[in-house]
Image (spheres, rainbow, N blue to C red):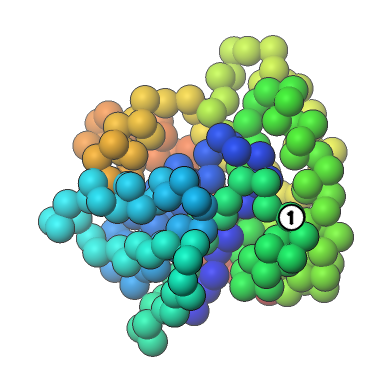
Amino acid sequence: MRHILILNAKGGSGKTTIATNLASYLASEDKNVLLLDCDPQGSSMAWSDARSAACPPIRVASAIKQTVRPTKNTEFVIIDSPAAVQGRELSGLLRRAETILIPVLASPIDMRAAASFIDTIKKSSRVANKHAKIALIANRVKERSNIYHELESFLKKKRIPVLTHLRDSMNYIRAMENGIGIFEMAPYATQADLNQWKPITKWIKSKRSQP
């Protein structure tokens, strides 16, 4: 059973977007998926409520007030973490993960907030002892903006794999509203987004993403 933690201490970085789209991708590959919503806002739960029974099944559960146990046949647990996570709560989440994805927005405020947080994650015993692998995703990127190049420079200094740059696309908003992922939308409308996701899905499938 793989545990993939979507993590960033700052709110609004796109954790739920990454979590729901990754869950829908794995479900479309006939994997048994549990999407664990650890955020009090319950965004993943709201996404699940909008999801049609005709879509590939994904078990979505809130871990805010109860302990959620995966079923024996669960292959992937995707953990949508809360904002402002730190201390014992952060340590508890890290202990559960073999794979960690950190989305970072292309803004000076987000980059400053992410800098110290990423360093904290790298120094954690889970990552330092190579019991979990970590990678970054540049999220909501506008390639023609000046901040895009600042983000590129920032991410390279972290010496962590930067898997891809996800564009600022309305497709993600439509997918969230309808309880689906971009992999379940018409390919002609999402081809650019699907191409940007290929490095993520390839890394998830590879041994490089696992201890």
Is residue 109 positioned above or below 155 on the image? above
- Residue 180, percent from left and from top: 28, 46
Q: Which residue is mark 1?
A: 86
- Residue 111's image quarter? top right
In this view, the residue in front, 100 or 116, is 116
Question: Horizontal placement of 202 versus 100: left or right?
Answer: left
Furthest residue toward front:
65
For the point 25% across and 51% down, the residue is: 49
Question: Horizontal placement of 19 versus 142: left or right?
Answer: left
Q: Quadrant of the C terminus?
A: bottom right
Disc 1 on helix, strand or loop?
loop
Whether residue 72 is visible here, answered yes or no, is: yes
Amino acid at dot 1: Gln
For the point 29% across and 53% down, the residue is: 48
How many numbered marks, from 0 up? 1
- Residue 171, percent from left and from top: 34, 30
For the point 13% across and 56% down, the residue is: 54
For the point 63% across and 31% down, the residue is: 105
Is residue 176 positioned above or below 202 on the image? above
- Residue 92, percent from left and from top: 68, 69
Question: Horizontal placement of 190 versus 79: left or right?
Answer: left
- Residue 156's image quarter? top right
Q: Residues within 10 Å of mark 1 (few under 14, many from 20)?
A: some
Whether residue 133 is visible here, answered yes or no, is: no
Is residue 42 positioned above or below 112 on the image? below
Question: Horizontal placement of 157 versus 184: left or right?
Answer: right
In this view, the residue in front, 18 or 152, is 18
In this view, the residue in front, 158 or 119, is 119
